[in-house]
Image: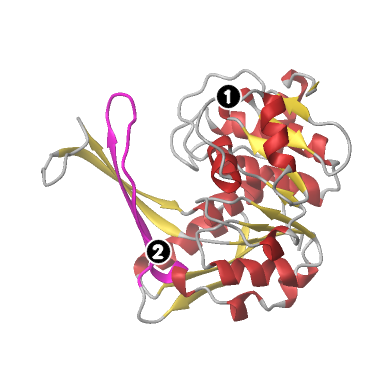
């Protein structure tokens, strides 16, 4: 197995509204869309679109939603034999009212079966043999720690949603991939804009391995264990919807690392994939394949050293 993803699977219920409701208020929605989601599943789907040898470990409920989530992953080329049904639990859900103009939203997540993912679920040969193990924080922390400890390959952790991370987990992580907000939360830094050099200083104080800080339209900051940090800008695209771009970045980064790309080259590939993913609507609506990313790569600007 090239990439093994351990994480969450949710069914997203998106409701279009003219404006978000206030406390105790009822508003009328104009449309509803049900779509596959969950950070783990989104990252697995992105990796699956970009190449073979991708599998996922997770839990869904013993319900029709669980069947839909497995089918959506399989359609993206992901092996789902380790996505288990959980009797007595419902598949995780995210209810998301979204304003028709501007895209402001609220998100209410019910973890459901995701909370039942246990360390025993990751004690499998597929994880121990994977080239890259990709983790997030939408499943129990003890399970994330067990997966990182059992992995023999490269461990990539996207610390989202952010929470305090024990030192023993950080010591097991080869590549930590926070966004700027998550980096501030992890380091206890105050809010406010920081230039790339200041972000590098925060990243080096985490006690993890290499750190890749995703910066949205500005690209990604690569802070290796050894050597100089660089800022990698993305290619220019006509963005339609940035939902899920960070998850696409993580899936693409894992695939590139599994192909033995050096970290800077893997990040270059990942920013191209993430940019391509913004050209359609939804978290998985425009996930690119490898050919589409290859077309974009020549337009990715050179990385710039951060001093």
Label 2: few (<14), some (14–19) or many (≥20) C-alpha neighbours in 10 Å: many
Name the residue nearer the viewer: 172 or 198. Answer: 198
Q: Position of residue 88 (x, y in %)?
A: 35, 81
Secondary element at tag 2: loop
Quadrant location, the C terminus: top right
Which residue is at the front of the view, 121 or 202?
A: 202
Judged left or right of residue 189, residue 11 is: left
Observer-nearest of 112 and 290: 112
Which residue position holds label 2? 111
- Magenta region, residue range: 90-114
In whole angstroms, how far apart are the C-alphas of marks 1 and 2? Answer: 30 Å
- Write down the residue under mark 1: 217
Coordinates of residue 248 in the picture (x, y in percent)? 59, 42
Q: Residue at x 74, y 51 (%)?
A: 207
The residue positioned 44% from the left and 38% from the top of the image is: 282
Rendering quarter of residue 202: top right
Residue 166 percent coordinates (x, y): 63, 62
Residue sitting at 56 percent across and 59 percent down?
74
């Amino acid at each position: 197995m090239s990439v093994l993803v351990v994480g969450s699977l949710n069914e997203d219920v998106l409701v279009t509204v003219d404006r978000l409701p206030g406390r105790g208020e009822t508003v009328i929605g104009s449309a509803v869309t049900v779509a596959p989601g969950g950070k783990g599943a989104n990252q697995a789907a992105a990796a699956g679109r970009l190449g073979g040898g991708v599998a996922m470990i997770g839990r869904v409920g013993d319900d029709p939603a669980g069947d839909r989530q497995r089918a959506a992953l399989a359609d993206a080329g992901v092996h789902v034999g380790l996505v288990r049904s959980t009797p007595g639990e419902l598949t995780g859900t995210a209810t998301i009212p979204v304003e028709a103009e501007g895209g402001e939203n609220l998100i209410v997540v019910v973890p459901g079966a995701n909370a039942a993912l246990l360390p025993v679920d990751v004690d499998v040969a597929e994880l121990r043999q994977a080239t890259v193990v990709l983790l997030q924080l939408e499943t129990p922390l003890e399970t994330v720690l067990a997966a990182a400890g059992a992995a023999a390959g490269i461990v990539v952790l996207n610390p989202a949603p952010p929470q305090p991370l024990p030192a023993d987990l950080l010591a097991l992580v080869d590549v930590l991939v926070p966004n700027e907000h998550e980096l501030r939360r992890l380091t206890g830094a105050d809010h406010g804009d920081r230039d790339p050099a200041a972000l590098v200083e925060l990243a080096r104080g985490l006690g993890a391995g290499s750190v890749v800080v995703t910066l949205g339209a500005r690209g990604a900051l690569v802070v290796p264990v050894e050597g100089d940090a660089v800022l990698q800008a993305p290619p220019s695209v006509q963005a339609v919807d940035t939902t899920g771009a960070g998850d696409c970045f993580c899936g693409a980064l894992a695939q590139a690392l599994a192909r033995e790309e050096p970290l800077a080259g893997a990040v270059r590939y990942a920013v191209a994939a993430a940019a391509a993913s913004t050209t359609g609507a939804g978290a998985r609506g425009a996930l690119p394949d490898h050919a589409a990313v290859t077309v974009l790569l020549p337009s990715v600007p050179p990385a710039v050293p951060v001093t």
